[in-house]
Image: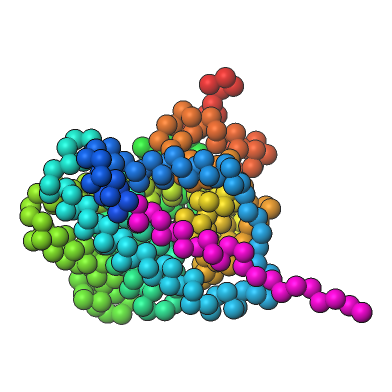
């Protein structure tokens, strides 16, 4: 008698609430600061993100398991996974209010730096939550995406990422795809300014096609920026003008965290042109992936980036790992730190890019005049 195979179940299901740990860390830091009086308590969030998570990545290792296709419709429809992304937002905004309140009391120089990094990391990771929500067709999720972007003032990401980056990814024309030999510090102004210009062009074109001015209440970018102005105005009224510099600095650091992630996701990768002169279709070879389980849980499986680009409407719980995807040597939390040290980054990554293209630098998305690092550099 044939024995039926056991039904598949999502073994990661109980892990997804851990994605809410990052916005919960400021409350733990507040308790620690109250109990000890130490300004170093406000460094808890960056220590966890850049210290504890990379260690757990190594200890726990990779997860390459993919859901079977017959289980995907039920996973996609399950409200459980959706509500976890929704819950990030109230935790995010509550953490920002706490940070503003502490800032007005004067945490001292050490505490101030830790507090800025804390708020920036919570709101920077919130951009990833906005990324997950913004790709969906449901209007409530798209509006929540804009709300999550408000604390960093990066509302134009909603337009540029969906309608710009996903079209031009892994090409020299994409401001959010970093080039082989390009440092993060050269990439940052190119992507920040280029993405802003691109978003406004895309939204302006959309309105002109409908015969109306882009300076309209229907402008998606103006919607999102208005949310930032309203949020900062309310917090300034509540906590005084002293909080405004804090809000501005944490916003810049927060969206810089996002751009550091953008930097490592497509570094040096390039789609080739076909016989018709058009870029080939996006496939799993055009994104750097990582199967580190811990960071994938904290980032809603953003590290399964290849499947996301091939299937943008696929929800995080159904994203797959592919053998043909180029693999990062560590999770995003670790790689982000390496990106901040260009010589180390290039030593770790350049030979991987060249190996991906069989040593042919002309096939990569490289800076003009690129020269590989010398052996021993």
- Residue 310 seen anywhere in this rendered image of the structure: no
Residue at point 24%, 70% (across, down): 223
Q: Looking at the rendering, in which quadrant would you find the N terminus?
A: bottom right
Residue at point 89%, 77% (across, down): 2
Magenta part of the chain: 1-26
Q: Image height check: is 47 above or below 242? A: above
Q: Position of residue 176 (x, y in %)?
A: 42, 51
291 in magenta: no
Q: Residue 274 lies in what quarter of the image?
A: bottom right
Residue closest to the eye, 335 or 208: 335
Q: Position of residue 283 (x, y in %)?
A: 61, 59
Residue at point 51%, 57% (across, down): 297
Q: Residue furthest right?
A: 1
* Left or right: 209 as drawn, with respect to 265: left
Q: Residue furthest top?
A: 376
Residue closest to the eye, 44 or 134: 44
Q: Residue furthest front?
A: 35
Residue closest to the eye, 233 or 136: 233
* Left or right: 150 as drawn, with respect to 358: left
Q: Residue 150 lies in what quarter of the image?
A: bottom left
Q: Position of residue 303 (x, y in %)?
A: 53, 53
Residue at point 21%, 76% (across, down): 217
Residue closest to the eye, 99 or 68: 99
11 in magenta: yes
Q: Image height check: is 276 above or below 333? A: below
Q: Position of residue 247 (x, y in %)?
A: 19, 52
- Residue 66 seen anywhere in this rendered image of the structure: yes
Q: How is the image coloured?
A: rainbow
* Left or right: 111 as drawn, with respect to 341: left
């Amino acid at each position: 008698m044939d024995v039926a195979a056991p039904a598949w179940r999502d073994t990661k299901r109980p892990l997804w609430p851990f994605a809410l740990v990052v916005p919960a860390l400021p409350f733990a830091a507040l308790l620690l600061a109250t109990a000890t009086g130490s300004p170093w308590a406000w460094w808890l969030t960056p220590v966890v993100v850049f210290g504890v998570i990379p260690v757990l990545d190594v200890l726990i290792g990779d997860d390459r398991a993919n859901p079977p296709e017959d289980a995907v419709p039920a996973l996609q429809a399950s409200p459980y996974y959706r509500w976890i992304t929704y819950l990030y937002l109230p935790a995010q905004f509550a953490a920002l209010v706490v940070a503003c309140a502490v800032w007005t009391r004067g945490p001292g120089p050490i505490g101030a730096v830790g507090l800025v990094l804390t708020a920036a990391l919570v709101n920077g990771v919130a951009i990833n939550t906005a990324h997950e929500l913004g790709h969906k067709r449901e209007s409530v999720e798209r509006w929540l995406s804009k709300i999550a972007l408000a604390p960093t003032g990066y509302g134009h990401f909603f337009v540029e990422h969906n309608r710009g980056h996903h079209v031009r990814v892994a090409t020299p024309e994409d401001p959010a795809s970093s080039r082989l030999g390009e440092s993060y510090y050269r990439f940052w102004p190119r992507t920040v300014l280029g993405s802003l210009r691109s978003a406004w062009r895309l939204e302006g074109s959309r309105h002109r096609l409908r015969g109306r001015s882009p300076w309209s209440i229907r402008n998606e970018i103006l919607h999102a920026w208005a949310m930032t102005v309203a949020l900062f105005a309310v917090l300034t009224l509540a906590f005084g003008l002293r909080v405004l510099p804090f809000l501005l600095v944490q916003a810049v650091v927060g969206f810089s965290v996002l751009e550091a992630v953008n930097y490592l996701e497509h570094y040096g990768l390039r789609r080739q042109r076909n016989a018709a002169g058009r870029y080939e279709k996006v496939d799993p070879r055009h994104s750097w992936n990582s199967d580190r389980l811990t960071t994938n849980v904290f980032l809603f499986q953003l590290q399964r980036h290849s499947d996301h680009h091939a299937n943008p409407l696929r929800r995080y719980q159904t994203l797959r790992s592919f053998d043909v995807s180029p693999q990062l040597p560590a999770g995003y939390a670790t790689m982000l730190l390496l990106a901040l040290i260009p010589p180390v980054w290039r030593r770790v990554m350049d030979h991987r890019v060249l190996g991906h293209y069989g040593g042919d630098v002309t096939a990569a998305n490289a800076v003009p005049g690129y020269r590989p690092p010398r052996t021993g550099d």
